[in-house]
Image (cartoon, coloured by chain):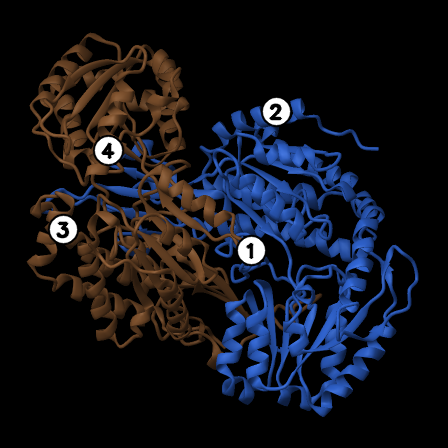
Chain colours: A brown, B blue
Amino acid sequence: MPTYTTTPEIDTLLQQANAATMRFKKTTILQRAELMHHIADAIEALDETLLQTAQQETNLPIARLASEKARTVFQWRSYADALASGNVLPVRIDTALPNRMPAPKPDLRKTYLPIGIVVVFCASNFPFAYSTAGGDTASAIAAGCAVVVNAHSAHVKTSTIMASAIAAGIEKAGYDKALFSHVVSNGFENGKYLVQHNLVKAVGFTGSYAGGKALYDIAQQRQQPIPVFAEMGSVNPVLVLPEKLKANPQKLAEQYASSLTLGVGQFCTNPGIIIVPDIPETNELLEVLANEITGTQPAAMLHSGIAESFHKNKATAIAQADVTVVAHAPYTAASDGNAIVALINSKNFMANKVLTHEVFGPFGLVVKYTSVQDAAAVIESLEGQLTATVWAEAEEAAANEDLINSLSEKCGRVIFNGFPTGVEVCYAMQHGGPFPAATDSRFTSVGPDAIKRFARPVSYQNWPDNLLPDELKNNNTLKIWRTINNQLTQEDVSV
Amino acid sequence: MPTYTTTPEIDTLLQQANAATMRFKKTTILQRAELMHHIADAIEALDETLLQTAQQETNLPIARLASEKARTVFQWRSYADALASGNVLPVRIDTALPNRMPAPKPDLRKTYLPIGIVVVFCASNFPFAYSTAGGDTASAIAAGCAVVVNAHSAHVKTSTIMASAIAAGIEKAGYDKALFSHVVSNGFENGKYLVQHNLVKAVGFTGSYAGGKALYDIAQQRQQPIPVFAEMGSVNPVLVLPEKLKANPQKLAEQYASSLTLGVGQFCTNPGIIIVPDIPETNELLEVLANEITGTQPAAMLHSGIAESFHKNKATAIAQADVTVVAHAPYTAASDGNAIVALINSKNFMANKVLTHEVFGPFGLVVKYTSVQDAAAVIESLEGQLTATVWAEAEEAAANEDLINSLSEKCGRVIFNGFPTGVEVCYAMQHGGPFPAATDSRFTSVGPDAIKRFARPVSYQNWPDNLLPDELKNNNTLKIWRTINNQLTQEDVSV
C-alpha cells in the first residue's frame, strides 16, 4: 500500500515549487538544456529494478519497457537540444526607429516565460515515456516550469523510481529539488485538488476521454481558467482504396492485424477502424484477418480496470445492430485482452455513434463502403482523431485527392501506406488532433514543439540591454536563430 | 435601423463558408498572402465616407481614424509578408531513415491547416484595426480560415463599409465571397448562436471582461469545446522607482497624464494604476498631475453605454474607503469622459480588490508605496495584465532586478521608461497576457504571430511528394525557411 499524499502536503509542495520557480525562470535555454541532459543521465543510469518493477505493475514485456526507457531518455535529450537551438521558442526582435513619422517605433524584443507550475497526469500505457519522467514533464521543465506529477495508481512504484531519477538529475545540476514533486493519490480527489489549485497554471494529461474531459472541465470552471492539454486517444481510421487492396489483400490483412494487436492494442494510435471497399478481394482480406486474429495469443492487459473496460466495451460494440464478428481470439482470462475483429457496412456504421467510440485494446471494426462518395461520407461522419491512414496505389491516390485530403481535416497525423502505431519523437511529429482526440488541436504532446504548451510570450519594450534575458540581448551569446527586423539570422543585433 | 441577420441566415452563411473553406484550404501561404494584399488594396481604396461614418458612429477624431485605417492596411500587408516567409507557421521536415535499428524511421513533414471557421467579435474602441477588417480577421484569413464577423452594434455602418472592402478584395483575388460573412445583431443572441454553432471552430474577441468571459464560457460548454482568444483589457500598472521620480517629477506627471487621457482613455493599454514611492517629490508629481488632469478637455466617449459605465465605475472607485480624489476634470456632459485621478496607499489598495478592476476611460489611481518590499507586494497582488511599465534610473533598475522581473510575471509586455499606450504592429509584439487580461496567455492578438491562434499543425507520414502541400514538397518552391532534420534551411530536401 503506497503512502498517499495529503492535501496539506500538496499545498506545501506547491508553495515550495512556486518559490523554486522564481529562481528557475531566470535560467537560459542553454542552462535548462543542460539540466535536462542531467535528468536524462539519471534515468539512463537506473538499473534493472526499474524494468522489473514496471513489468510487475503493467504486465508490459521487459523488451518493450527497455525500448520505452530509451525513448524517454531520447525525449529529454532531443527536447533539450531543440530548446537550445532557439527554434522551439523563437525569439523576435524589432529594433527602434526613433525618427519614424508620425511616431517613433520603440525597440521590442519577444521571448518566452514559463506559464507557471504544471501538473502532469500519467498514462497507464506508457509508464516511462508519457508518465512521471515523460514528454509532458520534459516539456514543462524545458519551458522553465516546476512540475507536479500525479502518479498513476497502476504503477506507483515505477513512478516513484522515476521521480527519484528526476530528483537526482536536478540535484546534480544544482537546482532546487522543489522544481519537481511527486504526488501519490488514492482516487480522484488529489487530481481535482491540484487542477483547482491557484498556484497551478497548466495541465498535461494522457489517457481516456472521460478522465481528460473531466480535468478539462474543472480547469475551465476555475475563477482563473488554465490550459489543459489532454490527449484522449481515438479510433485512428485506416482507409483502404480498391486498387491497393486488389494488389495484395493478404499482406494488408497481416499488417493490419499486426498493428491492431501490437502491445495488446493498448496504444492511443491503435487502428480501431478499417474502412474497406465492398469488392471480392475484401473476402480474402477478412479471411486472412480472421486467421491472424484467431491465432493471436491473448496477453495480460495493463491492469484489471483496463481489461474489464475492454471486455465490456467490446461486448457493447458487437451487440450493436448489424455488427457481425469476423474473428475472436479465444478467451484465456479476465485479465487478458483477446483480440477481436467485427464487420459492419457503412450505412449502419454511420447510423450508430456508439461504434465511433474507442474500445481501448485489440478491437478492430471493418467498415465496408460501396463507392468513393460513400467512403467520403464515412470519413466525414468521424470525430476528431489523432491519426488517419490511407492505403492506396500511387495512381488512385492522385485520382482521389479530395477524399485523401479529407483525412487531414479529421486528424493530427495522416499516414500513407503504413500504420499509425509507432509515434516518432521528432520535430515533424504532430501528436494531438481535433477534439475529442485532444483538447487543443493547436499543440502536440510529442516532439520538441510540445514545449510550446507550457510557455508564454513576453515582449520587452525599450528595455536596457543588461537587464534583458540573455536570448534577447544585442550580442547573440546563445548562438541561436532569431528573427531580427523580419529576417531570421544568427547575427548580433547591430546597435 | 440596420437589418439584423436572422439565425436561419447565419446557418446559410456558415454552410456556404464551410463549402468555401474546402477549396480555400488548398491555397498556399503565398496565395493567401496575395489575397491579403488585395484586401489591403480594397481597404486603402475606401474613400472619405469610411472616416466620416466612423467619426459619426464612434466620436473618434478623423485624424485618429485616418491613422487607424493606415494601421489596418499595414496589418494585412505585414501579416501577409510574414506568412509568406514561412516564419509564422514553421514547417518541420524529418526525412526517413529506412535502415535505422531497431525500427525504420518514417518520413514526417509537418505544416499547418486552418482550424476551421472563425467568428470575430468587433471592438468598440478600434472600429477598423480590431473590428471587421482588423487583426483577428486578417489572422484567420492568413491561416486559411473562413471568417464570420459579428458587427459591433455601435458602428454597424462602418462595419458594413469595411465588409464591402473585404468582399471586393476577395472577389479581385478570385476566391469565393463566402469566405467572409458579416452578421449584424440585435443584442447578444446572434453572438451566442455563432459561438455555439457546430461549424464554428474558433473565436476572436476584443472588449470587456464580462463579454469575453461570457463567450469563453459558452465555447467551453459546447459538446466540442473550441478555443476563444479574448483580449479583455487590464489596468496596466506603472511602477515608479524613487531615483527616477526625484530626477524629474514634473516630466513624469505630464507624460503619465498624457498617456492616461489619450483618446479619452479608451485603450485596453491605458495606464490605470501608477505605483509611486512615498517621498517628498511625490507631492510635486501629484500637483502637476492635478493641473494636467483638471486642464484636460473632456470629449465624447465611444458611445453612451461606455460613457455611462465610465461614470458609474469611476464613482464606485472613488467611493471606496481611503480613496481621495487628486483632481477631476470638470463635468461637461453625460456622453463625455472627464478625466480623474485618485490616490490611495498601498495597504488600503491591496485590501480592496474593487480597485484592481479596470475603469475603462481616463481614470488613474495613484498607489503610494513605502519600500521596495511594499512595491513588490503591490505588484504581487495584481491580476494578469496586458502590460506593466517601470520607470527607473539605469542604476536603480539594475539594483532592483527582482522587483523589475516580477512585472514580467504579471503581463504580456513590459515597458521601460515609457508608457503602454501605442501597440506596435510587429513580430516582437505580445498583446495578451495572463488571465484575466486574455483567455490564453500563449497567444498574441497583435503582430503576425497572431495567425497561430487559428492554425493547427498536421503531420504527413510517408506521403508521396506530389500529394504533399507545396510547403512540404522536396523542392522548396515557396523559398521559405524550413527545419529539415533539426536544421533551419532554405534548401530543398535532398532525396
Query: Could you tell me the amino acid type at mark 1?
Result: Gly
**x and y, in percent, of residue B13 in the image:** 62, 26
Query: Could you tell me the amino acid type at mark 4?
Result: Asn
**Secondary structure under the numbered disc 1 in the rendered image:** loop
**Secondary structure under the numbered disc 4 in the rendered image:** loop
Label 3 marks a residue whose chain is: A
Reading the chain from its start, which is encountered first: label 1 or label 2?
A: 2
Q: Which mark is residue B447?
A: 1
The answer to whether the residues at label 4 and label 1 have Cβ atoms under 8 Å apart is no
**x and y, in percent, of residue B309 in the image:** 79, 55
Mark 4 → mark 3, Cα distance in angstroms: 22 Å
Name the quadrant of the N terminus of chain B: top right
Label 2 marks a residue whose chain is: B
In this picture, residue B261 sits left or right of residue A224: right
How many other residues sit within 10 Å of disc 2, few (<14), some (14-19) or many (≥20)?
some
Q: Which residue is mark 4?
A: A270
The residue mark sitting in front, 4 or 1, is 4
Q: Which residue is mark 2?
A: B11
